[in-house]
């Protein structure tokens, strides 16, 4: 099953149970990269 098919299945299941839909695949990648980058920058500045 592809990621798209799994997302559609999860969205259908959430709608049938009146639950919020899951986020689309890949929608959080940019935020994850920004957080990781900020963490890397913070670690570099603390080294002697």
Image (tube, grey):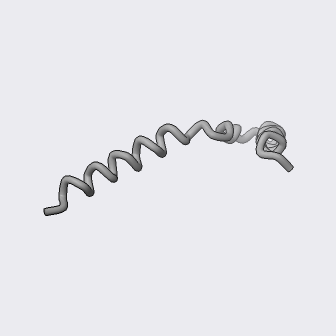
Question: Depth check: 45 or 12 in front?
Answer: 45
Q: Residue at x 70, y 38 (%)?
A: 21
Q: Is residue 43 left or right of residue 31?
A: left
The image quadrant that residue 28 belongs to is top right
How many dots with numbers? 0
Question: Depth check: 1 or 18 in front?
Answer: 1
The residue furthest left is 48
Q: Residue at x 81, y 38 (%)?
A: 8
Q: Quadrant of the C terminus?
A: bottom left
The residue furthest bottom is 48
Q: Residue at x 26, y 57 (%)?
A: 43
Q: Is residue 37 left or right of residue 6?
A: left
- Report x, y in % for residue 16: 83, 39
- Report x, y in % for residue 18: 76, 39
Q: Is residue 42 left or right of residue 17?
A: left
- Report x, y in % for residue 11: 78, 39
Q: Residue at x 86, y 50 (%)?
A: 1
Question: Depth check: 24 or 21 in front?
Answer: 24
């Amino acid at each position: 099953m592809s990621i798209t098919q799994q997302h559609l299945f999860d969205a259908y299941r959430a709608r049938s149970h009146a639950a919020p839909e899951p986020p689309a695949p890949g929608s959080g990648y940019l935020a994850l990269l920004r957080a990781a980058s900020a963490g890397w920058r913070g670690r570099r500045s603390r080294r002697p």
